[in-house]
Image (tube, rainbow, N blue to C red):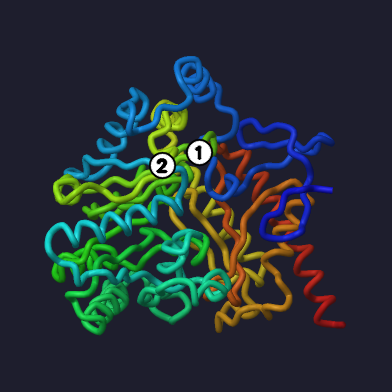
Amino acid sequence: MSHLFYQTSQRRPLLDQARGVYMWDVDGKRYLDGSSGAMVCNIGHSNPNVLDAMRRQMEKSTFGYRLHFETEASEQLAARTAALCPEGMNKVFFVSGGSEAVESAIKLARQHALAIGQAGRWRVISRSPSYHGCTLGALAVTGYTPLTDPFAPMMREMPKIPAPRAYLDGLDPTDPATGAHYAAMLETEILAQGPGSVLAFIVEPIGGASTGALVPPVGYMQAVQEICRRYGVLLILDEVMTGAGRTGRFLGLEHWNLSPDIVVLSKGFAAGYVPLGAIAARDDLVGAVLEGGGFLHGFTYAGNPLACAAGGAVIDEIARLDLVQNAAVMGAALRHRLDALMTRHPIIGDVRGQGLLLAFELMADPVTKAPLPSALNAHQRLVDIAYEMGLIVYSRRTRDGVEGDHIMVCPPLIVTEAHLDEIADTLDAALTRLADELALAEMA
């Protein structure tokens, strides 16, 4: 019996150890971590250089409260984080995870509006589907029905615009007109809400689990940035999943040379070695808040020296191993393998993503894009089959969390061609078994 509880009562084997891209349970069975946990373990498991950096910090101090001391580890990581962000984003605030980081970004944006005399700005526009975290503030900007509906009476839900799912709408994502079409929805919503009431637009540069690695149409990201500037709306980029090299750039925004107001980081930022997240913001934005009475927000573990030492070591390893470039190269190779699986398995209706943030969507009809019946729970069944075969992948429902099944295939950035072959071969076998099961279910 376990005294723990999480989302469900499903049990999994007891973890014994993890190294590189592999994990072992206590019975000795090996699993390839094909999703980096929840798209977290970017540099792989048990990296000795990160562990050494953590040991060195532990010998000095494991905690220093931010109101009592500055710490070398947090100052160094803040400086390095700022250097990796667009010019002018030199202020960094540390937290312990992605939900905390999103919450912090929203509250910083609101306090900035108050500091500059724009108290009427409070609405934060986001997209549907989307996922930005599980706190009530982060859920308010999340567009994922199963996660938000139970708590709707407890929060002030924020306005949403449709995510640019061109593949479902029958539009060409390589046509600039498509990007302009979806970006115009942001301007329409700003005008509908009243420009003077809109505080920010929060968006993942490349979609995460809610949309299954959705890459925006050509011109979309540049257009939404221009719209935000036109109406004085802050642009918050949620790079919790896309950051730290996952897409073949250190930050996803680099694919479009964007200059946001706030960037949100977590997951691969500390690669699972410790809980760590951050927001980076423009100097003038933070300056106005501090001069206006200070940032009325904080967490006990903000800037924890042990966490920051681990985060700094993760950045070191990303650079030393050239993992950003490896994500680009191996991402293209993995995409090729997933495309090949789509030709062999008619149940796959779309493959998408960037770098090693990739996904494929299961469909009843790849031509009409009709989803599989939700009662089949096909995405979870494929995850379970692959798990039995020693491959860990991650799944969600693409269409507002209600239907549409996609599988995230996002291994650590240290993967090799041999690892990719193992992933593809196991998925091939798992898809074959799933198709057989679905055929039997249909016959019954």
User: Is 91 on the left-hand or right-hand side of 152?
Assistant: left
Q: Where residue 76 sits in the image (x, y, percent)?
A: 31, 27
Q: Tell which circle, 1 or 2, labels the residue nearer the N-terminal end.
A: 2
Image side of residue 83 versus residue 24, left or right: left
1 and 2 marks in contact (CB < 8 Å)? yes
The residue drawn where x is 85% and y is 82% is 443
Find numbered disc 1 in the image and state the secondary structure of the residue it sits on: loop
* Quarter holding residue 366: bottom right
Q: Amino acid at mark 2?
A: Ala
Q: Nearer the viewer, residue 266 or 420?
A: 266
The residue carrying mark 1 is: 271
Does 155 sit left or right of 199 as displayed?
Answer: right
Q: Position of residue 25 (x, y in %)?
A: 77, 38
Q: From this view, report whether residue 270 is shown above or below residue 384.
A: above
Badge 1: few (under 14), some or many (20 or more) residues near its Cα, within 10 Å? many
Hey, which quadrant is residue 349 in on the image?
Answer: bottom right
Residue shown at the point (46%, 32%) measured from the top left:
307
Q: Is residue 249 visible?
A: no
Residue 264 image point, x, y percent: 36, 50
Residue 145: give x, y in percent of width and height. Answer: 53, 75
Residue lying at the far right in this picture: please name it.
444
Q: Residue at left 72%, top 78%?
A: 375
Query: Is residue 71 shown above or below 108?
Result: above
Mark 2 Cα shell of 10 Å, populated few (<14), some (14-19), many (≥20): many
Q: Is residue 320 visible?
A: yes
Tell me the CA gap for discs 1 and 2.
9 Å
Amino acid type, mark 1: Ala
Q: Quadrant of the C terminus?
A: bottom right
Front residue of 10 and 306: 306
For mark 2, what is the residue? 244
